Amino acid sequence: MPRIFMLLLSISVGTLAGIGVIIALTMGYYSWKAMLVAAAIGAVGAIPISWLVARRIQATDPQDSLD
């Protein structure tokens, strides 16, 4: 599971950090501190999401049902 978790994490960190920055810009926060906070919140939020998705993928892996 660590490999799939790391793969999902590398994708979701950038995605959720970008979403956080876009949300901050939409709300009218244009300072670099607001961008940094929004990106950090998105990046930290990606960790549990990636972990849950990796667990779900591993739980429904058809290779496990062949044994």
Image: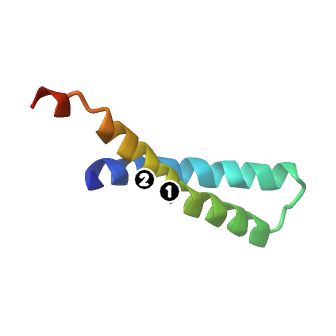
- Please rate how many residues cluster around mark 1, counting C-alpha atoms within 10 Å: few if below 14, some from 14 to 19, many from 20: few
The type of residue carrying mark 1 is Pro
Which three-letter amino acid code belongs to the residue tagged 2?
Answer: Trp
Where in the figure is residue 32, as x and y percent of width and height?
A: 76, 69
Residue drawn at the location 78% of the way across and 50% of the way down = 23
Q: CA distance from mark 1 to mark 2?
A: 5 Å
Q: Is residue 42 left or right of residue 65?
A: right
Q: Is residue 47 left or right of residue 29?
A: left
**In the rendered image, the vertical position of residue 53 relative to residue 47, given as above or below:** above
Residue corresponding to mark 1: 48
x, y (%) of residue 21?
Answer: 72, 55
Question: What residue appears at the point 18 percent right and 34 percent down from the top-left corner?
Answer: 64
Q: Position of residue 65 (x, y in %)?
A: 18, 29
Residue at (30%, 40%) from the top-left corner? 58
Per the image, label 2 sits on a secondary structure element best described as helix
Q: Which residue is mark 2?
A: 51
Residue at the extreme right of the image, as rendered: 28
**Dot 1 and dot 2 residues touching (CB under 8 Å):** yes
**Which quadrant does the C terminus fall into?**
top left
